[in-house]
Amino acid sequence: MPTLLLLLFTWLAAPVQDAVPGSEQFATRVVASGLENPWQMRWGPDGRLWVTERTGKRIVRVNPADGTKSVALTITDVVQRHGQDGLLGLALHPDLLKNRGADFVYVALTHDVDPGEAEVRRLAIRRYVYDGRTETLSNPTTLLDNLPAGNDHISGRLVFGRDQKLYLTIGDQGYNQLALYCSPIHAQELPTSADVQAKSFQKYEGKILRVNLDGSVPADNPTLGGVRSHIYSYGHRNAQGLIQAPDGHIYASEHGPSMDDELNLIQPGKNYGWPFVAGYRDDRVYVYANWSLSVPEPCATLKFNDITAPPSVPQQKETAWSSPDFMPPLRTFFTVGPDYRFSEQGNATIAPSGIDVYTTTTGAIPGWAKSVLVTGLIRGTVYRVKLNEAGDAAVGPTLEYFKARDRYRDVLVSPDGRTIYLATDANSQEHPGAIVAFTPQP
Ligand SMILES: [Ca+2]
Ligand SMILES: [Ca+2]
Ligand SMILES: [Ca+2]
């Protein structure tokens, strides 16, 4: 084989190790600031940006032209105590403000289900009704409650599907690491039919759900281990980004451990590998160390380390596990080899959060259709991954845009494709708690 062809083949086969700066130039405009951790943005039929504030517990409508803010609702019973809980996902019914009796707005939130002194935090999907005359939301209906909500990795991204179903991401709760290192991960465990009958949703950790608009289990959800439940896909770690493209494909971003953040194509009944596999099933760096099973030293006597585990902790290579339903990611950010020095180079991660798809073909930004835009929290960057025509593979290098000392939490492409809106965390350095707009320069 000629050297050039060999090089090309090697490049095509190898996971992308790093990203390259995009060449397009953009003008920056701060649309709104003073938001308390804006978390999810949606483009409303009223031409407003509809935004949840994770810690502010509000649903705010922002005029993208002048930044005017209008509070549609404050959800006072949201319980927010940690870094990833509070008022999270937001989805708008496609018939909102269409005079069809479906002025519905859906949210995912954490709250206390214990009526007494104790606090039992759970994730819920709630529906509100929008009144276009008063520009307020009211009449809450709980669709699904008692979903897992711990201290970490709650996920909570919500999408209204083209099939009239709600899709919700639920994380692995941050188990098997940091302060929760002695709690085992349940992302591979599936509910029994008794669990489903009893509405016991503990096994929904590390899953993506597909839910009827009344909260029930769709009759055409996949059967997993012989049981049909709300679960659409499993083996997820912390999918903070979820979007459906106009062609129906569903994409999710997912936080990896110290490497291998992922962009995934979500399909029914598929297993995304966690915690047996991070990124590709390639045995390159990641091994599954289950701290909770440490013997003879009990886990609680050990000091957690996210790179190496002591010999008492059972460890398993990625290829020691297999599943016919395993789905590798479309792209990782980033996959590194055994020569990567974490102590010197830091984690090979971007901490991906909200995502959007760029499908506008009017030429607003030439070459961008069709791409997935992935926000990064820790590198102040949005990553663009070009997709093939079928939308089932990533092509070309990962491209970087909008670098700033900000934590990008969500991204929204305007319907005309001419503006990219980014929402930032409150602890961003350049634009804290803001919505920033980027428009291409000729
Ligand atoms: Ca209580
Ligand atoms: Ca995975
Ligand atoms: Ca791997």
Image: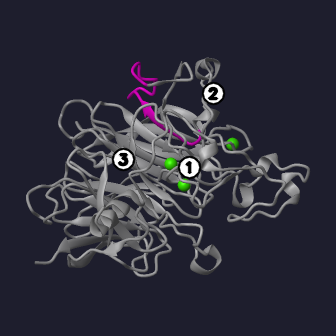
Separation of marks 3 and 1 at Cα, in angstroms: 15 Å
329 sits to left or right of 4? right
Residue type, mark 1 in image: Arg
Query: Regarding mark 2 in the picture, which secondary structure is present there?
Result: loop
Mark 1 or mark 2, which is nearer to you? 1
Q: Nearer the viewer, residue 71 or 79?
A: 79
Q: Position of residue 381 (x, y in %)?
A: 38, 72
Residue wearing tag 3: 251
Quarter of the image that includes the N terminus: bottom left
Q: How is the image coloured?
A: one colour
User: Which residue matches tag 1?
Assistant: 237
Numbered circle sitting on residue 100? none
Say what amino acid the circle numbered 2 marks: Ser
- Outermost residue, front direction? 1
Q: Residue 220: x, y in percent?
A: 39, 21
**Label 1, label 2: how far apart the Cα atoms are:** 20 Å
What element does badge 3 sit on? strand
Residue 198, x across and y down, in percent: 63, 20
